Image (cartoon, helix red, strand yellow):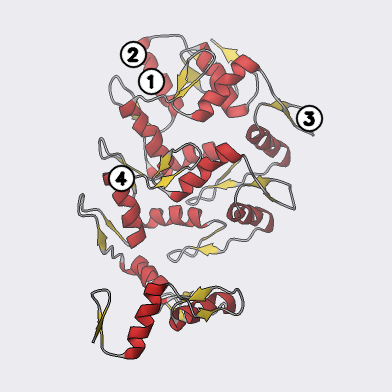
Amino acid sequence: MYKVCKNSFGQNRIINRNMLIHAGKKLHVCELCNKSFTRKSNLSSHMLIHTGKKPHVCKICNKSFTYKYSLNSHILIHTGEKPHACELCNKSFAKKGDLKKHLLIHTGEKPHVCEVCGKSFTQKVSLYKHLLNHTGNEPHVCEICNKSFAYKCNLNSHILIHTGEKPHVCEVCNKSFARKAHLDRHILIHTGEKPYVCEVCKKSFFQKYNLKMHTLIHTGEKPHVCEICNKSFPYKCNLNSHILSHTEKEPHVCEICNKSFAYKCNLNNHILIHTGEKPHVCEVCNKSFTRKAHLNNHILIHTREKPHVCEVCNKSFTQRRSLSKHLLNHTGKKTYVCELYNNLFTQKSILREDILIQTGEKINKLHV
């Protein structure tokens, strides 16, 4: 018998393989991409990536997978089984990776640290997004419309808009989607799951965006501060729009009608008026929208969420404008109405800032 790591082995072949693991040697090399592996079985599994073979087939829906563990995870969709349970709150998950992400909520751990400024994040994808604040790089450019992206995966997803391809198919109702994230969100319609839970009041939400908005009710946090007038805002996009009231710069110009905008994203939204494109589609009823914010508001009709809560009487509303109108019952203040979106405001300055958020333009269309 041979012992090196508290594991015992009875055969020389197994001993030798175990020693290679400790030595870090990888003798099995892929002839196509030169990636190396410690075990021949791992190389064989890797080769499936190049051959495109998917030998593991689901007996329920006939969907095929490259690896057996992927099939095992998939089967849980049909069975509804969630074998991975959190020991702290008893919430269960179908995948072990989802449980690991969930545990970070309890531990407060943020293992992904920015090497530039030291800021830490719970998820790696959040760190990647943050790094763009330092680099500003968007090296991946769409050859069709010249839109640029920070990551190639985002470019690949974007290209599907032009091709019309929807490779991600719901296994329950066969509806297809261009992006996997959209499919994941759609599946919640079938399961009824609301995975985003407020840690303060335990209210759950269908979308992460709605949880983020809801959390501000408890914290009152406004971390984004204007360096000119010290006014603070809950979101950076609100601060950016506010800064325009000081600078009045609108460098992004529409080539069709010469209208100018403060931000490129606002220009992109504006161009949709000319093209008639509505890229944001509701996964429940297929209604399409020009802007994602409008889609988010629409989805609340299906989910019946009411994220906008009155701080005076705790009455909740689906849309912010409904809350603003309701607040007049408590305050009795004047109403300022936006002609563009019919939103109601109690202060003229707030109306101006909201118009900037929606359009990026300096517009003075007010009713009192």
Residue located at (60% from left, 80% from top): 31
**What residue did someone put label 2 on?**
330
Q: Earlier in the sequence, mark 3 or mark 1?
A: 3
| Residue 163 lies in quadrant | bottom right
Q: Earlier in the sequence, mark 3 or mark 2?
A: 3
SS class, disc 4: helix
Q: Nearer the viewer, mark 3 or mark 4?
A: 4
Residue 183 in the figure: left or right of residue 266: left
Q: Nearer the viewer, mark 3 or mark 2?
A: 3
Residue 174 in the figure: left or right of residue 256: left
Residue 277 position (above or below residue 8): above
Residue located at (58% from left, 28% from top): 358
Which mark, residue 105?
4
Q: Earlier in the sequence, mark 2 or mark 4?
A: 4
Residue 291 seen in render? no
**What residue did someone put label 3 on?**
257
Residue 143 in the figure: left or right of residue 68: right
| Residue 14 lies in quadrant | bottom left
SS class, disc 3: loop
Q: Position of residue 367 (x, y in %)?
A: 56, 12
Residue type (three-letter) at the residue carrying disc 2? His
Q: Nearer the viewer, mark 3 or mark 1?
A: 3
Marks 4/1 in contact by CB < 8 Å: the verdict is no
